[in-house]
Amino acid sequence: MNFIEVKTKEDKKEFNNFAARLYKDNPYWIRPLNKDIEIVFDETQNPLFNHRENYNGKEIRAEAIRWLLQDNKGETVGRIAAFINPKTVFKDNKQPTGGAGFFECINDEKVAFALFDKAKKWLSERGMEAMDAPINFGERNQWWGVLIDGFDKPPNYQMGYHFEYYKDFFEKWGFQEYFQQFTYGRKMYDVSDRLKKIADRVMAREGYSFAHINKATIDKHAEDFREVYNASWGNHEGVAKLTVEDSKALLKQMKPILEENLVWFAYFEGKAIGFYVMLPELNQLFKHLNGKFGLWQKLQFMWHKMQKKNKTVFGVIFGVAPEFQRKGVELGMVVAYQEERKKYLNKIPPYQYNYIEFNWIGDFNTGMVKLCESLEAEKVKRHATYRYLFDRTQPFERMKEIK
């Protein structure tokens, strides 16, 4: 077998086409847009490449690499990427930790193990002592975790769909489960009267307000998002705080697909204290484009979008500043959206969306798990994020629960 570092235009094309060939007979897999994958590895578009951190006098910079693995006949049999995110190398880790992701592989244990070995060797040579996988070179809301349950459901936008045998490969090689990510789903009926009363109380309190995003003031919302994200998520294990540039880049990337009444903020005395970000389930549109997004595909995308056949939205991320948690703010944003939605139900054409999936709920986030279950949502998919300690004598610890 032979490893090829992905550098050329042809290599990049093969990196994406290999996955398409691998899943061509699977009715649930939806091909990601090539551009969404390539942005991750593009130094001009992924702001993480500009980041540096200094630990004990040693500079750690962002690095990423990816490989194709070919057999003796020159056929691609696997792919993998490895990366060092300077924001998270030492973030709540007892050892410097790198990552691997974008793993795809034929059903051959030797091939899978060769891919894992390659990523481990590259990370070891750069001073890493552990590897998380499969993860993204960037934020957690994209390409994170391997699917372990829900193989009869299509993947949400920028989330992975995988073969059932991947889980066995990870665990047999030596990876241990660091945490699971749940996807909950429910029809868009109103919350129970009990929960509605809780939400109404917080919405009626002096100083509290709820509003959806306005694209005309996207930079202000980017700063609101950054402040709440860093307060609610930035102190958790393995989560890096967002810079101003990160937040603007994230919302800029989402702006073309944002629908204003799907992104909500909670405020107290004018200061952002919570957000609830939903997006149309774009894979239901992108599944027609075969990974491309040129002029013809954009026209196809607009045509399918105008048909309003997509009935699903997915919750990308939910956050509330710690001092306002468990006060009903989360429910307030949900109910504020529902009240806005009611305005469109009797119009022609009727409101498009009738089903929601809450994406990326970590099993360590017991508060969000309880919230989803209180909303009568059902667990429809599970992904797992694994960790491998290079020193096999060291004790392994799962992600700590959020208190």
Image: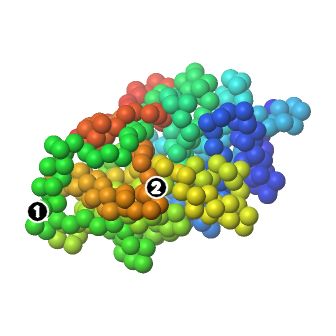
Q: How far across and down, in percent of the image, does residue 18 sit?
A: 75, 41
- Residue at 47 percent across and 60 percent down: it is 349
Could one spot residue 316 in this view of the protein? no
Image: 102 above or below 258? above
From the viewer's side, name the closer residue of 127 and 239: 239
Circle 1 SS class: loop
What residue is pinned by disc 2?
352
Q: What is the three-letter code of the residue carrying label 1? A: Arg
Asked if residue 325 lies left or right of residue 136, the reply is left
Q: How far across and down, in percent of the image, does residue 217 sit?
A: 39, 77
Q: How far across and down, in percent of the image, does residue 168 sit?
A: 58, 23
Q: What is the three-letter code of the residue carrying label 2? A: Gln
Mark 2 to mark 1 CA distance (whole Å): 32 Å
Circle 2 SS class: loop
What residue is pinned by disc 1?
205
Q: Quadrant of residue 214?
A: bottom left
- Residue at 64 percent across and 62 percent down: it is 303
